[in-house]
Amino acid sequence: MAPTRTSDHVSLKRKPRLRELVIQSLLFVCGLLSIFVTAGIIYELGKESLLFFGRTQWQLTNKPIVADIAPADTRIEVGPIGTPLREGDTLRLDQEVLHLIAIEDSIYVVERGVQDTAPASHAAGAVLHKGVDPSLAEFFTGTTWAPHAGQFGVLPLLNATLMVSGIAILVALPLGLATAIYLSEYASPRARNTLKPILEILAGVPTVVYGYFALTFMTPLLRTIFGQNVVQIYNTASAGIVIGILILPLVSTISEDALNAVPRSLREAAYGLGATRLETAVRIVLPAAFSGIAAAAILAISRAVGETMVVALAAGAGPAFTFNPFQAAETMTGHIVRISGGDLSYDSLDYNSIFAIGLMLFVMTLALNIFSQYIVRRFREVYE
Amino acid sequence: MTDIAPAAAATAAIESKDLSIYYGSFQAVRDVNLDIQPNRITAIIGPSGCGKSTVLRAFNRMNELIPNVNTTGEVLFRGQNIYKSDVDPVEVRRHIGMVFQKPNPFPKSVYENVAWGARINGFKGNMDELVHNSLTAAALWDEVKDKLDQSGLSLSGGQQQRLCIARAIAVRPDIILMDEPCSALDPIATLRIEELMRDLATEYTIIIVTHNMQQAARVSDRTAFFSLSDDGKRAGMLMEYGDTKTMFTRPEKKITEDYITGRFG
Amino acid sequence: MSASNLQQRHRTGRVWLVVFQVALLTGIVALTALLFNILNGSFGYVAIEDTIAPQDLAVNGVPLEEQDKDTLIQVLQAHISAGLFARYEFDKPFAERSAGEVYDLILERVVEPKFVAQWSLYETLTNRDAIRQTAAQDFPNARLEFRSWLNSHFLRAPQSSYPEIAGVRTAVLGSLWTIGIAVLFAFPVGVAAAVYLQEYAPDNLINRIIQTNITNLAGVPSIIYGILGLAIFVRALGHFTSGVAFGASDPTTSNGRTILSAGLTLGMLVLPLIIINAQEAIKAVPSSLRQASFGLGATRWETVWHHVLPNAISGIMTGTILAISRAIGETAPLVVIGASTFIQVDPEGPFSNFTTLPIQIYQWTARPQSVFRNLAGGASLVLLGLLLTLNATAIILRNRYRRSL
Ligand SMILES: Nc1ncnc2c1ncn2[C@@H]1O[C@H](COP(=O)(O)OP(=O)(O)OP(=O)(O)O)[C@@H](O)[C@H]1O
Ligand SMILES: [Mg+2]
């Protein structure tokens, strides 16, 4: 073999590796893209929500003016039909904004051309719009959600979301935890290897199929058990139970991982003290895995809060402030789907409102997810 | 170390000056000055954790693949400090190859294993010939000539390690670094690799880390003994360096003698 | 400790074991109920009333099913108004229609079967005689037929407001189109991001932020992606997603509620999943391979391209298929970005309006008439079949991967 080796003088100098540089930049941009997605979510949700809260929403009152009016008139006569107005309301006629000072039967005493608009002439038959300002306080305390009637309380939607999630976690946590204990502490490896994939099928079924299941199976079942008069066709109980089934594999898988992470030595120590299998599982292993299980539960709640199709199909198609799980009530997600399912025009009240609700949903689930990650991190520290 | 004339030191194949290496804030290696002579086998020995592998990897900048490693001092190769900021570690590794503790052939054919490195390094000649020559040089050709298109993983452990050596020499490095290349092999495979190293030494400079004192004594021309500092900081330091024969018969330091005779380590 | 105390403890243990087993069983029962419920809706008796019975349409003793195209056209012409016939001719000349299409037209317009009542599979199996009686009493003109709602006509036919002739063809095509676009977008970007994070990213603030961000994005409810898609793809980029910018559609009628918008939205949704799964697959590649490659003087990209990716690819594919399975079943985001409720023509390309299989299931389930629930059941079977195929592919890939290592 001829020693045709590199010549005595070699340069180790860095040569510009253009290809490497281009590729690395491209890869970095792809990594960065996920940041843009988040930024996009926050920006769009924030922007449109601000529009929702920061802008006067004009509602059609169907109330016409009876006679032509000139720019100087401050007393205008209105017809008897349409939504009644109150003193202090802000009104709009075409482009002009008016302030309603007093009502004398069918005569409205108004201040003309407010909010930087110019008084103008209006023809008889022009219809009044009423201005409504959604406020944050009303958003979080109002118990009626009817934006077109000027009521912006998100509580009915929030309440329904919490009820459905609550029912779901009431179903999923005990079942999931008991399943996890059985699989990790009792089942033979063989049984575990067959049972786990079966449960995981549940996680792979599309949520719309769960919605179908809720409406065509769970609701009739509940109505048979509790009575047709007690249980409405749409109700939060059915949706909640079915979402509970949907998040069951999530709870059981993560809980089982947490249980498995408990060191063997701990179990052996318990057995060595004469504890039974149950006592070891429940008194020793379970508390040691507590934070992992808590993380699983929180993640499951987050999932339930964001779940959409089941509630859209089975929980109800109208906001209702009720604590009765057998009554219909629309959740935040269900509302978004229903509103946007129709022909949603941009910059309308509805369009802005789904962003406001969406922002709230985003914040709720994000907080839950971060909380769950925080717990998981704490949990790691315990075992290192 | 009296036998090294200053002139010889000037022609060192590779040389470290005040080399210190840190993992985060932990100093794993302190102030190592080591000049490796060309076309010789240099063995690095010492107790576990004294930084042998770390020093070896410093010779071709493989430490950079580990996060948070910091290197100070110089490593001179052909008169250039390979840690200078304008030096490309990829270029360095093309001249200074490496064989690892556990055989790690690529999950590709035997042929590809040898050819790949040469190809990415821009080899334009006859590839079949290069593969043949490299495998012959690694004393593997006869055993694999009929299975060149089989997976490198289908070979025995010893064959795999020789394949890794063939792969390393196919890119024509000047220096081959070997980190305990025989520790995962049985005695017969080990013997074959040792013979191979002696053959390769006529052409290559070889640095080998080993835990096996007999191996160091058998194959190496020179031996560097590392140990942990006794100041409680557990930093690895070069304790003694010299001709293997001298080191194993008349070590200068007590600690070297203790280690070589198996009194600690 | 006395013996009876120990006995007591063992008894408690046994009781709780039963509780645990019951919990597990409940999960399995729920799954069984879920699947059975779909089958229950997808098969069963229907009572059908025909305006004209098919056997009355026999010509010279040749039954309708066996007639050739010309005869079929004559039959059609004889039974529908001249105006309607002319309109069909205008829509698509009969010369260009296949015999099957004409046959379908006859069924739709001449035979005009009407489902007057339908029963679930469970009722059909357990209550056959009672159903026969009821049907004979309440619908004397109807014939009773055991129907599989999942049938070849159902797969071939476009959406329709008549349950008798409705099918899932447009929806299935819409699903495939949207998924295709989602994958085209999310797969390369996701794998690239995963490669960046695993192989390139130094451990610094920005990369930690990217990683945390991806984890959190994976937990964002899918409907939020729908809202984002509505704001960005449908509205802000409507000029492009509608195809107007490329001259592909008519600016006066088209909008951004297209397959392209839907695909990109789903792509964003599965992106974090693909990244996370690909990262896992890349992590599983032994680092000794990378060291060997670097030791030979390979650059980072040479190492990634020649060693890391080939060894991670089956894992990446498996993860991607799982992510696609998730996307195929997604409904809410597509409803939000405005999947069209009623689409009868096959999607022609990325700028078409669309509907998808899950949306179809949603709309049929939401209809008050119970007959549409049967259609929803059939469509659910199609969807589950699609998912099963995908997952089987993933499992095969995974097994092959295991063997090769
Ligand atoms: N990746 C790493 N991160 C942090 N510390 C490390 C890392 N690798 C090695 N060290 C530390 O650096 C010191 C030297 O390690 P090194 O692997 O070089 O020792 P060694 O002499 O090769 O030991 P052995 O004979 O066991 O292979 C040890 O204290 C070790 O714990
Ligand atoms: Mg070592």
Image (cartoon, rainbow, N blue to C red):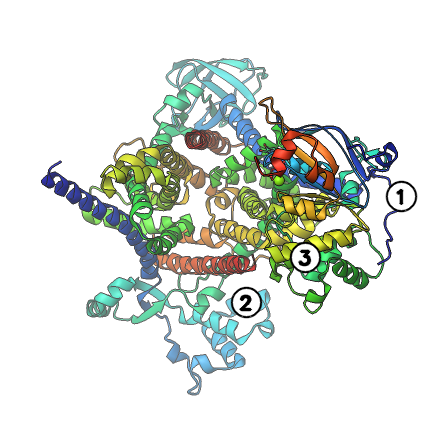
Q: Which of these two is toward me, A147 or B218?
A: B218
Query: Where residue B86 sits: x, y (%)?
Result: 81, 32
Please give the residue where the numbered disc 3 appears in the rendered image: B192
Of all chains, the one bearing label 1 is: A
User: Is the CB atom of the residue marked by disc 3 within 8 angstroms of ligand 2's nearest atom?
Assistant: no
Classify 10 Å Cα crowding around label 1: few (below 14), some (14-19), many (20 and above): few
How far is the residue under mark 3 from the one under mark 1?
31 Å
Q: Which of these two is toward me, C394 or A2?
A: A2
- Left or right relative to C350: residue C163: left
Q: Secondary structure at mark 3?
A: helix
Query: Where residue C370 sits: x, y (%)?
Result: 32, 56
Say whether residue A197 is visible.
yes
Location of residue B258 by image quarter: top right
Please give the residue where the numbered disc 1 appears in the rendered image: A8
Q: Which of these two is toward me, A232 or B118?
A: B118
Q: Residue at x 62, y 42 (%)?
A: B211
Discs 3, 1 touching: Cβ within 8 Å: no
Q: Residue at x 29, y 62 (%)?
A: C120
Residue C88: numbered disc: 2
Mark 2 vs mark 1, foreground winner is 1
Q: Above or below — where is A334 with respect to A73?
A: below
Q: In the rendered structure, which amino acid carries the disc numbered 2? A: Tyr
